[in-house]
Image (cartoon, rainbow, N blue to C red):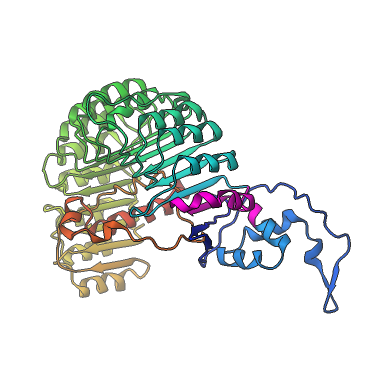
Amino acid sequence: MGQSSSTAAVSSGRESNHSHGSKSKSTALISPMRDEEPSDCEIIDGEPDYISVLPDECLAFIFQSLSSGDRKRCSLVCRRWLRIEGQSRHRLSLNAQSDLFPMVHALFSRFDAVTKLALKCDRRSASIGDEALQAISFRCRNLTRLKLRSCRDVTDAGMAAFAKNCKGLKKLSCGSCTFGAKGMNAILDNCAFLEELSVKRLRGITDGAAAEPIGPGLAASSLKTICLKELYNGQCFGPLIIGSKNLRTLKLFRCSGDWDKLFEVIADRVTHMVEIHLERLQVSDVGLSAISNCLDLEILHLVKTPECTNLGLVSVAERCKLLRKLHIDGWKANRMGDDGLIAVAKNCPNLQELVLIGVNPTTSSLEMLASNCQNLERLALCGSDTVGDAEISCIAAKCVALKKLCIKSCPVSDHGMEALANGCPNLVKVKVKKCRGVTCEGADWLRANRGSLAVNLDSGEAEHPDASASDGGAQENGVEFTPVPSQISVPPIASSRAGRSMSFKSRLGLFSGRSFVVCTLRRWSSGSSSSRS
């Protein structure tokens, strides 16, 4: 984000601020303040006070290098520091309950340079309404990013009023809101610079044939990222996706309906996409064949799409030769395997990251991948019944560029660990989880023989592997404001999710086992981004 991060929580008529330890630097330009500075240093306890002659711009820059708690304490020193600290904040997060409205004027009189705003409400509380959102839009006409969470009392009219006042908006993320197609279309028609749109559980969209189409609007020419999650009628965004000629990233998670026909139209009109995520979507080889028209495709995630088979993967591999990252969660359906992976090996020499979950590759495909994909640096094999010591030995012998290896719930033993001791010369990290054949002694032996290799072993009881990346899409977690450690956090809000049973979570694919692979790969990807650039 690059700018100072701050959060102000408003509850019961007071600001509640909590500090974090880390710091966030800002490159934002600070407008000159109007107050005149004293020409000479003041004398305090016989010592000159050089801070008194420090320009406001310099003081603001110093504040932006502090943690939130330190910034709050600095704002209490004097009125000048209070003013400068408020005017140099660019990000604000508010507890968007209904009692926020009377405080809007006072809040944004102090924080008048906000460009990134998050409005979050407890699901059990009444949220702000149209009047409050419109008042905020009047005070924040330079807003570039807006995040709405559980603002259930905001309607189409409120979104329309906001869109007319904040036409410079570049990123919108909304979840669990109740406005509908009219409000979304108002944003798209007025915010011509919108680049990122993330929509999750938008309750106001009509289900069925009566649904009003969304888009394309003025924003279609500038949109680069669209993320849709858990929408009953996500296909009503079809006109927007089709009309977004400059779209680079498309993420679809758990959106109902048959997407094959829409993908045929999308891929025919939007041909420069580089990243596509599909999770729990009704899409088949027909849709994958359409996606293969995106010749610039570099990143493809297929998570729990059981109608996709080797045939569809082959069509993608044969045409999308720039593929760098491929994630497949086959859901143990055995519909993707060696045939598809061999096609990837033959046609995608730039492959750097491969994640296979619930897929059963053999030495035939693994050897081909290792031989042809000389840039393969990150490999994850999870929940595979066919990945044993022979397959790990093949990887150790052939994957010369491999740096990170993750193995989970596979029939691997200490013999496989021994093979890694003499292979993969560039390997720096190995994570092994729930592989019953791998013992602590085997892991210790590997550490002893390769001192520079980080070995992480978790030999817990095997469970159903699930490394779905729905929230990250990463993620993610694509598309909302990324939490920054130096934010002043909103007081903890109890989530209704906490009361859900584990069986319900398992149906949603939210087992904790997911975090092992997802978090690992996020760190791996971020760690290697600089080397790619």
User: Which residue is nearer to you in this view: 417 or 324?
Assistant: 324
Residue 320, quarter of picture: top left
Residue 442 is covered by the magenta coloring: no
Residue 409 appears left or right of 532? left
Let me know if residue 207 appears in the view. Answer: yes
Let me know if residue 276 appears in the view. Answer: no
Question: Residue 302 placed where, x, y %?
Answer: 24, 40
Residue 262, quarter of picture: top left
Residue 111 is covered by the magenta coloring: yes
Question: Residue 225 placed where, x, y %?
Answer: 41, 35
User: Which residue is nearer to you in this view: 205 or 145?
Assistant: 205
Question: Residue 247 placed where, x, y %?
Answer: 41, 30
Residue 372 appears left or right of 138? left
The part of the chain drawn in magenta is: 86-112
Residue 524 appears left or right of 446? right
Whether 299 is drawn above or below 222: the answer is below
Residue shown at the point (71%, 66%) measured from the top left: 78
Number of numbered discs overlaid on the protein picture: 0
Question: Residue 114 placed where, x, y %?
Answer: 58, 47
Residue 353 appears left or right of 40? left
User: Which residue is nearer to you in this view: 154 or 216?
Assistant: 154
The residue at the far bottom in this view is: 45
